[in-house]
Structures are given as structure tokens and as C-alpha cells.
Image (cartoon, helix red, strand yellow):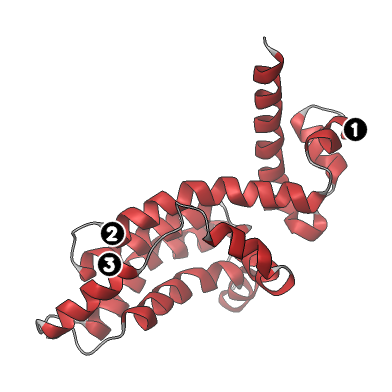
Amino acid sequence: MTEKKFNQDTEAKILEAAKEVFHQKGMDGARMQEIANAAGINKAMLHYYFRSKQLLFEAVFKNAFSLLAPQLNKVLNDDSSVEEKVKSFTHNYISFMKKHPYLPNFIIQESNRNPGFFEMIKNNNGFPSLDKFKNQVALEVEQGILRPTDGEQLFVTIVSMNIFPFVAKPLIKGFLKMGEDDFEQLMEQRKRVVSEFIINSIKKT
């Protein structure tokens, strides 16, 4: 095995181990030693690849976002109707967040603590563009398919309704007196519930 291949494999193991530990413990609860143990390496080697927990968490986020961004871009920029985009976006977003449940809280924390990090993410070529979506919403309003609706407001509504349950997961589980399996089922149901709620609110009858 070449040194380059070894480095790539080791980094991939670290990112996978970190993802699991961050999932279980959150950013504050995770410890570098735990991540090193889960990756099967010593702590010194972990610090060789990632000097701090923050840098490691950012790497995990970038890796996850690189998987999500193409899905969102495809939904926002394909030729499907706004109704289909709402359904696809909701389905893809909830499915993704179920696999990466630590991301919503990280996004909120980082937005407040380190806004420059998201400016860097936003400037990447793969960052989703809203231009076509906004134009399409305006066109369907003009065609009488949708009620008067602002594309930016609609996008914020879609994201908000999808992300909030993951941000407020402990609170929701407490209010509804449900365990993890029940919450998972609730999120699956929201793929339909959120889509129908938004579509019924914007579509002309």
C-alpha cells in the first residue's frame, strides 16, 4: 500500500468514526480520544490528520454537505413542477438528516459562532442555487397554478418545516412521549405531511 493510499484510508476511517461519535455525543460531548479509539488509531495520529475537534467536525460537515448539495441542486434545478420539487426536496432532506442527525444543531451553532465558515461553504461551486426555483415559482404564479407566493419565502418555509424537528428532537420526543423508533417513524410520516401542507397552502384549487 502506498503512503498516499494509506493516508486516504486512514482519513476516511477517522471521518467515519467521527461521524458516529458526533452522532452519539454531539459536538460538545465528543472526545478526540473516543474518535481515535473508534478509528483504531492513537490520539497522536488523529491530531496529525486533524489538529482540533473543531477542524474534524468541520471536515465531517463538509463531507456530509458534499453528499447533500448535489441532491438539493438537482431538485431545485430540474424541470419538474414546483409541487414535485416540494415533494422531492422534503423527501431527500428528511432522509439525509435521518442519516446525519448531528448536522442541524451544528449548522445553527456554527452560524452564530463562526459565520465565516459558511461563507466559505457558500462559495463552493456545488452550493445549491435558488435562481431557477424562484423564477419557476414566479412563472407558476403568473400561470395561475400557484397562489401569489414569493420563492424565497417558500424556500425558507420548506427548510424550516423540515429542519426544526431535528433541531428540537429532545423537546419533541418529550412532548410526544416517544422513543427513538417512534421519532424515526414520525420523521418518515413528515415526508408526506410537510409536502401536503405546503402544497395545499400554495396551490390554487
Residue 18 percent coordinates (x, y): 71, 43
Which residue is depicted at the point 38% across and 57% down?
72
Q: Nearer the viewer, residue 21 or 61?
A: 61
Mark 3 / mark 2, whichever is N-terminal: 2
Q: Are marks 3 and 2 in contact (CB under 8 Å)?
A: yes
Q: Is residue 152 above or below residue 48?
A: below
Q: Is residue 36 visible?
A: yes
Q: Which mark is residue 132?
A: 3
Give left or right: position of 28 versus 6.
Answer: right
- Secondary structure under tag 1 reads helix
Residue denoted by label 2: 77
Which amino acid does the dot numbered 1 rest on?
Ala
Q: Spatial distance from mark 1 to mark 3, Cα to Cα?
A: 47 Å
Q: Quadrant of the C terminus?
A: bottom left
- Secondary structure under tag 3 reads helix
Q: Nearer the viewer, mark 2 or mark 1?
A: 2
Q: Nearer the viewer, residue 162 or 55?
A: 55
Residue 151 percent coordinates (x, y): 32, 79
Q: Is residue 163 above or below residue 98?
A: below
- Secondary structure under tag 2 reads helix
Which amino acid does the dot numbered 2 rest on?
Asn
